[in-house]
Amino acid sequence: MAETKKSNLALVAARAGVSVASVSRVLNGGSASEQLAKRVREAADELGYVPDASARTMRTGRTDQITLAVADVGNPVYVQMMRTVTGIVAKAGYRLVVSSTGADPKDQIDLVRSLNRGYADGLLISPLRITPDLVEALSASRLPIVVIGTLPPEVELDNVRADSATGIGLAVEHLIAQGRRRIALVNGPVDTVPGSARLAGHRAALERFGLAASDELEVTATGFTYRAGHRATARLLAQAEPDAIIGANDLLAVGALKELAAAGRRVPEDVAVVGMDDTDAAELATPSLTSVDLGSAKRAKAAAKLLIRRIEDPDAPVVRQVIAPALSVRESTVPEAPRA
């Protein structure tokens, strides 16, 4: 029977027939012969001994944990990021801890401050809203931090961001090539980083192709969710007659598809639809959804590598990286488009 409560380094050492120092060295990842390491681990397993992680952290100053903070762990973009980051940090010897902070910067500030107490070795954060208080908390943190998203240019933090303006320009260009001229935008909240960037990009793209922006062709959803997209599209159809809709993310666009079907509008014959992020939801939608790939996996991979670099070299120069977008064409804009 495992002697979990009584087992300690001395008992493990006695069971393995080695010194306490040897046990400590093996269980804390120090150098040891393969034979010695095997004896110690077998003894520890037999006794049910688990090393005290908090004590190890105090000795080494490391937790071997990296935190990923996102607004909504259910969003397909963040799921893709989590998968990618998990693989990168595991190869570097870290565990990934995920925190769903919501969209309120105050909750993200609280997280940053709590992590400063030694609960992680680094933080990857993808905030929806960037406020002066959040920027101050991130900049003042002793923790290595990489931001996945856009930061003010004067902020000296590593960050990796999407190019939303170029991405939405690809969507507008594609729709115009399909003969569409009344191109609507179903956006998320405009006080968020993606919401403001995609609104500005949409208007700039229309102007570049000689189309005028129209208030009646712009609606703002309450969030970047399927249901919010459904409701916002209903408002759009009550006030305008678009021949194309761009959703600020795939969930909003899938909500638009649902509302268009309920309203008896054929996609893409009557209204073409484009999403953004090119998540699994785009491929699973009916019809399959044309979407702008903003490189969520590439952003996550680049950010994870930057964070490990920052942990290993705190004085490394700040890196700001932009991931180029690409358009994936599917049935929601071209009837005969092959499924991806």
Image (cartoon, rainbow, N blue to C red):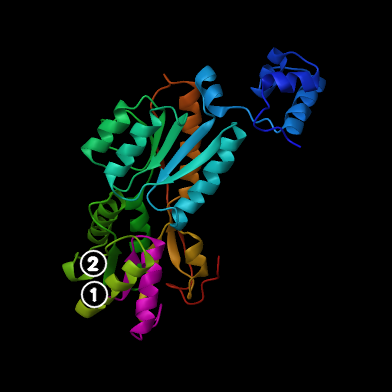
Q: Does 252 appear in magenta?
A: yes
Locate residue 61, reporting x and y percent. Answer: 49, 20
| Vertical position of residue 237 compared to residue 246: above or below | below
Question: Is mark 1 in CB contact (under 8 Å) with mark 2?
Answer: yes
Q: Residues within 10 Å of mark 2 (few under 14, many from 20)?
A: many
Mark 2: amino acid: Val
Q: Residue at x 29, y 60 (%)?
A: 188
For marks 1 and 2, give the CA distance: 8 Å
Q: For the point 49% across and 27% down, which residue is it?
A: 309
Q: Is 176 left, or right, of 277 in this rendering?
A: left
Lower sequence index among marks 1 and 2: 2
Q: Position of residue 224 (x, y in %)?
A: 34, 60
* Residue at the image position 37 percent from the left and 60 percent from the top: 249
Which residue is at the front of the view, 25 or 121?
25
Q: Is residue 193 left or right of residue 280?
A: left
Q: Which mark is residue 219?
A: 2
Q: Nearer the viewer, residue 219 or 241?
A: 219
Q: Secondary structure at mark 1?
A: helix
Observer able to see residue 320: no
Residue 156 is a magenta residue: no
Identity of the amino acid at label 1? Arg
Q: Which mark is residue 235?
A: 1
Q: Which mark is residue 125?
A: none
- Magenta residues? 242-269
Q: Secondary structure at mark 2?
A: strand
Residue 69 visible in the picture = yes
Instruction: Report the side of 171 relative to 306 (left or right).
Output: left
**From the image, which quarter does the C terminus lie in?**
bottom right
Within 10 Å of disc 1 (Cα), the crowding (few <14, some 14-19, many 20+) is some
Q: Residue at the location (61% across, 35% down)?
A: 91
